C-alpha cells in the first residue's frame, strides 16, 4: 500500500525530496520504481526528475548512485539531524 502511495506522489510530481537512510531503503525505492517503469508507461528517470535524493552517508550514497543514477545531497553530519539540516 505504501509503495502505491509513493508511486502516486512521484507520478503527480508532489515530492520535493526523498531521504534515504540506508542502502536497504535505496534498494527498496529502486525496486518500486523499476516495477513502475517495467510497464513502459513511464521511465525511471522521469519519476525522480524533480525529486531530490538526500542520503545519510557515503555507503548510502554509493548505493543510491549505483541503483538510481544520482545523489543530490549527502548529509555532512551522517545522522538524521544532518539530513534535516540539508532540507532547510
Image (tube, rainbow, N blue to C red):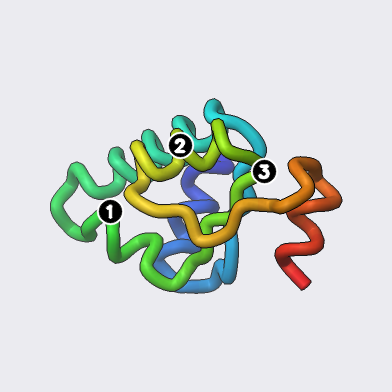
Viewer-proximal residue among 17 and 1: 17
Report the side of 49 relative to 42 (left or right). right
- Circle nearer the N terminus (3, 1): 1
Label 1 sits on a secondary structure element that is: helix
Residue placed under numbered mark 1 in the picture? 44
Residue in the picture at 39% in, 53% down: 70
Residue placed under numbered mark 2 in the picture? 62
Find residue 2 and report its image quarter: top right
Q: Residues within 10 Å of mark 1 (few under 14, many from 20)?
A: some
Q: Position of residue 14 (x, y in %)?
A: 54, 72
Q: Position of residue 24 (x, y in %)?
A: 54, 26
Q: CA distance from mark 3 to mark 1?
A: 22 Å
Residue placed under numbered mark 3 in the picture? 56
* Residue closest to the far top: 24
State the quadrant of the N terminus.
top right
Task: Give the vertical position of 51 relative to 58 (above or below).
Answer: below
Label 3 sits on a secondary structure element that is: loop
Label 2 sits on a secondary structure element that is: helix
Report the side of 11 relative to 60 (left or right). left
Viewer-proximal residue among 6 and 84: 84
Amino acid at each position: 500500500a505504501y509503495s502505491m502511495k509513493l508511486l502516486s506522489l512521484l507520478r503527480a510530481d508532489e515530492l520535493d525530496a526523498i531521504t534515504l537512510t540506508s542502502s536497504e531503503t535505496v534498494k527498496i525505492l529502486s525496486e518500486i520504481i523499476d516495477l513502475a517503469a517495467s510497464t513502459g508507461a513511464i521511465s525511471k528517470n522521469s519519476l525522480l526528475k524533480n525529486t531530490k535524493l538526500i542520503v545519510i552517508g557515503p555507503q548510502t550514497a554509493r548505493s543510491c548512485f549505483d541503483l538510481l543514477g544520482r545523489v543530490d545531497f549527502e548529509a555532512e553530519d551522517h545522522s538524521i539531524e544532518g539530513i534535516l539540516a540539508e532540507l532547510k
